[in-house]
Image (cartoon, grey):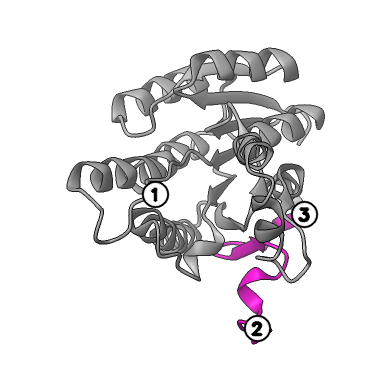
Amino acid sequence: MHDKVVVVTGGASGIGEAMVKRFCAEGARVVLGDVDDAGGLRVAEQHGAQFLHLDVRLPEHWQALEHLLGSDYGRLDALMNNAGIVSNQSIVEADVSTWSNLLSVNLTGMMLGCQTAIKVMQKNPEGSAGSIVNTASSTSYLAIPGDVAYCTSKAGVVGLTKSVAVHCATEGLNIRANSIHPGATMTAILKQAVDEMPELEPKLARMSPMGRMGKVDEVAAMAFFLASEEAAFCTGGQFPVEGGTVSEHPRML
């Protein structure tokens, strides 16, 4: 990925920050998009990326990114479509405003990202090519009761990714699309919660048959693989990074 151009949305913290760190370390030229200006500027400065204020819900923000890529970089090799939020509302608690906003970020934002990436990747100097990696979740497969909008959005990411992948493949665009599916992962936000409530950590660790939570660098490693030419024949796939969580039948003891 040396000298390749990579966009990471939601790159100001958590898994997105780990993606920025990994791609910059590998010599890629990274554009970090986020609504968190302070966090985004901090991460960009720390790792050598460029920060762009990006609200993934807004088509005009994606148009601004498209313009930036065309004028300053002349190409796009990989999009890490990673921005996402939670609602913490069950089906009986969900209100339309919260539901609509979450789907706008987690699903419509990803659709707009895919659209923009395909437009730019088709104009790459060497010809149409690139990789789109959409961040889904282990909840794409196994639902949780406390966040109906999040589960719905992450299941939708699978269908979106498959449709994008087969469209690009059948049109001969040489643009791949895959989804990654983290389980319980120790992000900075989750670490803060564990520090405040230490009893959470063993409960979170038990969610995986491996008996621990995932690390953000482990998720970034999967994203890096899918962005690279090592994954040249991978498209439309779902790639879990969740320690076997979705493979184990519930235990009796």
Sequence order check, earlier mark of 3 and 2: 3
Give coordinates of residue 242: x percent, y percent. 67, 61
Where does the image place residue 45, in percent across and percent down from the top left? 69, 12
- Tag 1: residue type? Asn
Residue projecting furthest to the bottom: 252
Q: Residue at x 65, y 57 (%)?
A: 204
**Residue 35 visible, this angle:** yes
Question: Majority secondary structure of the magenta segment?
Answer: loop
Which amino acid is tagged 3? Answer: Glu
Residues at discs 2 and 1 in contact (Cβ within 8 Å): no
Q: Can I make out residue 126 in this image? A: no
Q: Residue at x 33, y 52 (%)?
A: 89
Per the model, the C-alpha gap separating discs 2 and 1 is 26 Å
Q: Position of residue 244 (x, y in %)?
A: 70, 70
- In the rendered view, tell whether residue 92 sits above or below residue 133: below
Q: Amino acid under label 2?
A: Arg
